[in-house]
């Protein structure tokens, strides 16, 4: 069992950030949601509550 509140670490290479439910299959996941993350910060998906943490600078991305 995984901790649902644990942040998923991403890097600038992973941008633009989108979530379609980290624990869902593609066919039954929530809609793909693009998340406007800032450099060296975190953001929570409004659909599933997954928390993403960007390590680095979001140059040219929203």
Image: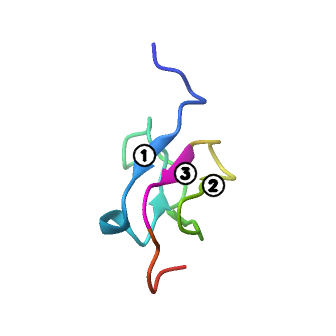
The answer, for residue 28, to whether it is visible in the render is no
Circle 1 sits on which residue?
A: 9
**Total marks drawn?**
3
Report the side of 21 relative to 41 (left or right).
left
The answer, for residue 25, to whether it is visible in the render is yes
Q: Which residue sits furthest top? A: 1
Q: Position of residue 61 (x, y in %)?
A: 47, 81
Q: Position of residue 4 (x, y in %)?
A: 57, 27
Q: Are marks 1 and 3 in contact (CB under 8 Å)?
A: no
Q: Which tag is nearer the camera, tag 2 or tag 3?
A: 2
Q: Looking at this view, is 43 or 18 the one in front?
A: 43
Q: Position of residue 49 (x, y in %)?
A: 65, 42
Q: Residue at x 58, y 69 (%)?
A: 38
Q: Looking at this view, is 27 or 24 the one in front?
A: 24
Report the side of 61 relative to 49 (left or right).
left
Magenta stretch, residue numbers:
51-56
- Is the C terminus in the top left, top right, bottom left or bottom right quadrant? bottom right
In space, the residues marked 2 and 3 are separated at their CA atoms by 17 Å
**Mark 2 closeness class: few <14, some 14–19, many ≥20 residues within 10 Å:** some
Circle 3 sits on which residue?
A: 30
User: Is residue 25 shown above or below 17?
Assistant: above
* Numbered badge on residue 43: 2
Q: Looking at this view, is 48 or 9 the one in front?
A: 9
Q: Are marks 2 and 1 in contact (CB under 8 Å)?
A: no
């Amino acid at each position: 069992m995984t901790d649902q509140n644990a942040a998923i670490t991403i890097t600038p290479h992973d941008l633009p950030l989108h979530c379609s439910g980290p624990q869902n299959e593609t066919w039954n996941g929530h809609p793909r949601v693009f998340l406007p993350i800032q450099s060296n910060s975190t953001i929570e998906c409004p659909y599933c509550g997954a928390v993403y943490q960007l390590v680095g600078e979001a140059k040219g991305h929203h």
